[in-house]
Image: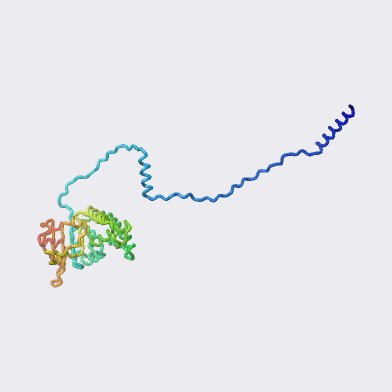
Amino acid sequence: MSNELSKLEKMLKELTEERAEKPEERAPKIEEKPVVTPEVEEKPIAVPEQKPEEVYEQRIKEEEKREVKVPEVIVKDEFKIEEDVPPAKEVYLIYGEKGVGKTTLAFGFPGEIVCLSFDRKSAIVKKTRFDNASRIHVFDVVKYMDYSSPKTVTASADKTFRYVCAVLEYVKSLNPDWIVIDGAEIFSQICEWTMRYRNGLEAFQGISNLNLWKERRLYIRQVHNKALNIAKKGLIYTTYTDKSDIVIDGELVTRKDVPKWIDVLVFETDYVIKVEHDPVNKKFIAKIVTSKDDSKLPTGATIDVTNKVFSEAVRQIGGRLE
């Protein structure tokens, strides 16, 4: 019994010594390392391109879904109502061949005159025929025109049109009696090129949409109405001569001289005057082709304007220019 107990104690002692000599096993230490995320190349998300009309239709549909209550607003127009009583503003058209004195005749009207020069010859007439009279104001309105290429023609015409409107705003302070548009056919051409420029057309490109000619007419009338509102007495246009065929029973009988009409003049001209030069007698003659008031300018009258101011020549035949 004692021997067994001794053996047991010996075994316990050996076991205790073995544990003391053997180091304690610990779990391995885990070191934290930064997590590296692999780089992924970002690719743009392809969004299907929408046409402008599709975007517009989509917006319309979105707006229709929203119920917006708009308060009713009653707007009353404010008008200045007055009778058009004499003396009403008048429109004169002076036409003839080159060098017969169209501008000279126009500058012979009485009062303060503003001239929009489309042919760049008006200032010469002011100097040589009227001794640079202070009552006559000439503006070169085509100084921005550039004829170097078809594209520059239309672009510069648009700038010229805007310049014409700016000049009209400027001359309000001059309080003119008459505004002269010297070179009506050039003015009409600039309005056409302006229309072409604003619609992406070249200077001499064909036009499939004939409604665009209405836009040119709009620009002509815009300047005409603006000038007529500024002038106290009216407008004077100068233009060249055109030919009109007179046909009877299908045969050409003769060709008649007529003015180169532009849109607005067909409807709003009150007096048409043709200027001619008689080289044999060395005279300049003004013929009253049509007149709205024969007491002022008798229809069919022939007036010798050689070395005379037009207003004085009219008085000599019993007429008047107011």
Q: Is residue 275 left or right of residue 211?
A: left
Residue name at image x 29 percent, y 37 percent? 72
Q: Position of residue 19 (x, y in %)?
A: 80, 36
Quarter of the rendering containing residue 1: top right
Q: Is residue 49 left or right of residue 22?
A: left
Q: Is residue 167 left or right of residue 17?
A: left
Count of number-bearing discs: 0
Q: Is residue 3 left or right of residue 93?
A: right
Does residue 45 lie above or below 304 as drawn? above
Q: Is residue 174 visible?
A: no
What color scheme is it? rainbow
Quarter of the rendering containing residue 186: bottom left
* Residue in front for this viewpoint, 31 or 43: 43
* Residue in front for this viewpoint, 74 or 231: 74
Q: Is residue 263 visible?
A: yes
Seen from this angle, which residue lies furthest bottom?
280
Q: Position of residue 137 (x, y in %)?
A: 25, 60
Q: Position of residue 279 (x, y in %)?
A: 15, 72
Q: Position of residue 10 (x, y in %)?
A: 86, 32
Location of the C terminus (image quadrant): bottom left
